[in-house]
Image (cartoon, rainbow, N blue to C red):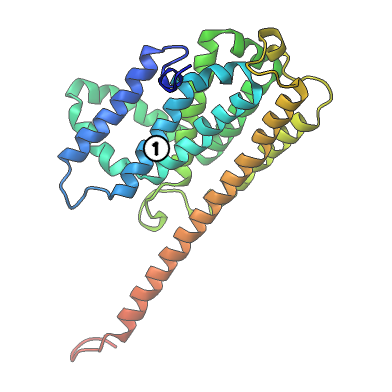
Amino acid sequence: MSAAGYLLPYDFSPLTVFSFAAVLGLYGIALLRMPAAERPGPLRIVTFVLGVMLCYTVMQTRFDYYSQYMFFVHRGQHLILHHLGPILIALSNPLPIARYWYGFAGPGSRRLLAPLGWLYRLLQQPAIAAFLFVGLIFFWLWPPIHFDAMLSRQLYWLMNWSMLLDGLLFWWLILDSRLPAVSDALGYGKRILLLALVAIPQMILGAWIVFSRGMVYDVYEVCGRAWPMPPETDQLLGGLLTWIPPAMMSIVGILIILRRAMHEDGGQSNRQSRQSRQPITEGSTP
């Protein structure tokens, strides 16, 4: 197969292609509409596009074929959809650009967005966000559910889209660029706690897959594997991808949050220091 053949969709989904094309198209148009002073730098733009294209690649290229016929590739697919892609998108801070998308919606569309706003605020409650983030992983990896999802086209697409959307919601909550002191953004301490809490169940699940005796996911035996790899090796690699990289993502997230917290504390200290050094003018209260 030629290189171009690997870039073509294995299971073409008009909705998926349209959704990703619409996001990138609206992002580009919004960038052009933004005042130059507000426009993000090249690094943020590249980070956003990279996050979107990674998610598109694992859903609408030949990668998706291997995801359906190799367990460890499937786990890599969900690692990108649920972690890496959403992390890059959240780090790019697309909210200022997204405000310009709102201008494309008419009054009727804006009324329809109101219930979505209520649902978004509900899903962004820390306990609900953490439960959904971990719960979806366990749900789709529960052997009977996983068996059905890999054999049903509708369930397979529902699984992948749910992982992507939930990843975006969770990592946006964690990596929200707004300052908690002056907004309703989640506090830094709570974000770190959430990252630690969601890492532990994922590590336990990955370890269970790694050390399980016998085949946990026999659907890949039914459908056949894309490569002549021993089933035990496929399951071992898939368990490791479920165990180690997600924990590393939580550690990276904690480091990013700690850096932001220290930067914010340092900025406040500098402002207080400058104010304390200002001379007291005549008639002012010491």
Nearer the observer, 116 or 283: 116
Q: Is residue 235 visible?
A: yes
Q: Residue at x 73, y 37 (%)?
A: 204
Q: Residue at x 81, y 32 (%)?
A: 211
Picture layout, residue 269 above or below residue 188: below
Looking at the rendering, which quadrant does residue 269 occupy? bottom left
Task: For the C terminus, give its image quadrant.
Answer: bottom left
The kind of secondary structure element at disc 1 is helix
Q: Position of residue 141 (x, y in %)?
A: 66, 23
Amino acid type for the residue under numbered disc 1: Leu
Question: Dot 1 surroundings within 10 Å: few (below 14), some, or many (20 or more)?
Answer: some
Q: Position of residue 266 (x, y in %)?
A: 42, 70
Picture layout, residue 272 above or below residue 59: below
Q: Residue furthest bottom?
A: 282
Q: Residue at x 47, y 14 (%)?
A: 10
Q: Is residue 169 left or right of residue 208?
A: left
The residue under label 1 is: 50
